[in-house]
Amino acid sequence: MQRMETQYGRPGDPYDLRSIEASAKLRLAKPPLISLSDILTAIVVATTLCQLTGLEASVEKVGLVKTEVHHGEVWRLLTCGLIHGSVLHILLNAMSLRNCARGVELMVGKWAMVFCFFVAVIGGSLFSLYFKPFTVSVGASGGILGLVGLLCVLVLRHRRILPPGFGGNMVFNLALVVAMGILIPQIDNFAHLGGFVAGVAVGVAVIPGDAQRLQYPEAGWIVWSGRISLGIIVLASAFSMFKMLTPY
């Protein structure tokens, strides 16, 4: 029993897991039929499905073609994160995105989750643009790694209130990503790195130092940042679909 109290905190202290869990249950007393993490994942999947019109052509139209970005098509920094390179690519990323996004949504907040994904996709694209200027990149991996980065900040700041093994799971996932990046040459490791760094930065900004504040509603600036981010993502998805479905 003593170990359990040390692990999870005692009732009333700043790291009382039971009070935080109770607050989470209160927020989810009437959970929506579809969560925001489900909506975000659906947007990415729906955009990728439009690539059925032609994989190579879709990548040329809205992927991170670096020369086109330098010519002014900066919207590619975001649209590239909504399409993928293969069926396996979208399947893996869709599962990872939904799981990571759901975790951030429940433990930190839904608008922080959307804002983090948005910033991380662009951050990953910028890293790729600078460090790999002669390649073409696609995929939501940068955004996913951003969510992982945010969760890592949560672990570092509030490890005591998290379930046993949560931090170790984060380390394992990061090690797996690094290993895949080494073994699979097609993976854009700089996009992953940029997304992760962006996610850590967002995590530092949105995750409070006081664990009790995790129980409170998200700050106003986070809510508006998330809403604006979601709006831009929806517009980017619609724009990408239009580009891919429109013949040259």
Image: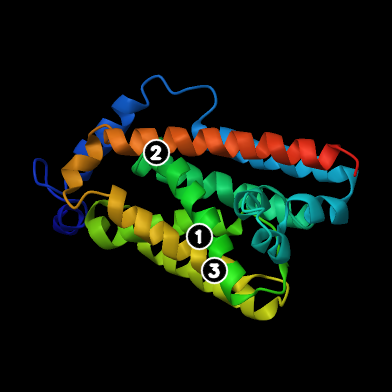
Q: Which mark is residue 123?
A: 1
- Residue 6: x and y, percent? 16, 57
**Considering the numbered disc 1 on the image, is that residue within a helix, a strand or a loop?**
helix
**Considering the numbered disc 3 on the image, is that residue within a helix, a strand or a loop?**
helix
Cα distance between the residues tagged 1 and 2: 16 Å
Q: Is residue 146 left or right of residue 223?
A: right
Q: Is residue 207 visible?
A: yes
Q: Is residue 166 visible?
A: no
Instruction: Judge by depth and name the residue closer to the eye, 53 or 98.
Output: 53
Q: Do the residues under discs 2 and 3 have CB atoms within 8 angstroms?
A: no
Q: Which quadrant would residue 239 be assigned to in this image? A: top right
- Residue 193: x and y, percent? 51, 69
Q: Do the residues under discs 1 and 3 have CB atoms within 8 angstroms?
A: yes
Q: Residues within 10 Å of mark 2 (few under 14, many from 20)?
A: some
Q: Is residue 205 left or right of residue 43?
A: left
Label 2 sits on what residue type? Ser
- Residue 240: x and y, percent? 72, 41
Q: Residues within 10 Å of mark 3 (few under 14, many from 20)?
A: many
Which numbered disc flags the more N-terminal residue, 1 or 2?
1
Which numbered disc flags the more N-terminal residue, 2 or 3?
3
Q: Is residue 118 left or right of residue 15?
A: right
Q: Which mark is residue 225?
A: 2
Label 3 sits on what residue type? Phe
Residue that mark 3 sits on: 127
Q: What residue is shown at x 36% (from left), y 22% (from top)?
A: 29
Instruction: Judge by depth and name the residue closer to the eye, 247 or 199.
Output: 247
Cα distance between the residues tagged 2 and 3: 22 Å
Q: What residue is shown at x 91% (from left), y 40% (from top)?
A: 247
Label 1 sits on what residue type? Gly
Q: What residue is shown at x 44% (from left), y 23% (from top)?
A: 31
Q: Which quadrant would residue 60 be assigned to in this image? A: bottom right
